[in-house]
Image (cartoon, grey):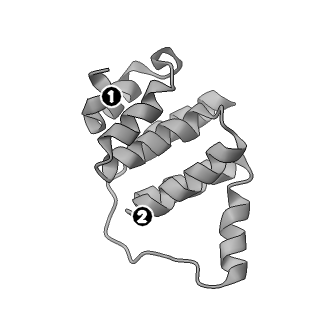
Amino acid sequence: MQHEYIKGLAAALFIAAQPVAAVYAETLPELDAMAEVAVDEEKGIAFAQEQSARGEYLEAIATLERVLALHPRSDSARLLHAVNLCKIDDQLGGAVELGKLKQKNFAPELWADVMKLCPLADKE
């Protein structure tokens, strides 16, 4: 099942995000709904992918941090977290996250694309 998410992650990572008005939760029920989505690993990753595709990198990072708090072994969430960190120019943070992953668990093309986004990780 994880391989399916990695395939989906690969497709979602590099979608060209069109400028769209950011969607922010403003009420407690909206915040609760956003937090609840992260309880389920798959739903949390999918939601973070949507946020990232809209250019909401900080929000995607926050979602993925909630997913990783509950599912610390989620390679898909960690990879997407690293990519989003690199997108906001936190190369060191991205490199640290990528350092926790095993390259052999990912398609070579996906790993190469991630290294282009996070060149500092490639130097470790």
Check disc 2 and report its element: helix, strand or loop.
loop
Locate the N terminus by quadrant.
Answer: top right
Q: Position of residue 24 (x, y in %)?
A: 52, 77
- 104 left or right, relative to 41: left
Q: Is residue 92 left or right of residue 5?
A: left
What is the three-letter code of the residue carrying label 2?
Glu
Q: Residue at x 28, y 49 (%)?
A: 89
Task: Identify the residue at horizontal 58%, vertical 31% (top origin).
Answer: 75
Q: Kindly identify which residue carries mark 1.
A: 121
Residue ID at (58%, 78%):
25
The answer to whether residue 54 is left or right of residue 25 is left
Residue located farthest toward the bottom when viewing the structure as drawn: 27
User: In this picture, is 15 found above or below 50?
Assistant: above
The residue that mark 2 highlights is: 56
Q: Residues within 10 Å of mark 2 (few under 14, many from 20)?
A: many
Instruction: Identify which residue is drawn at 71% across, 70% down.
Output: 33
Q: Does residue 124 lie above or below 71 as drawn?
A: above
Which quadrant does the C terminus fall into? top left
Vertical relation: 100 (above or below) 66: above
Closer to the camera in the image, 91 or 42: 91
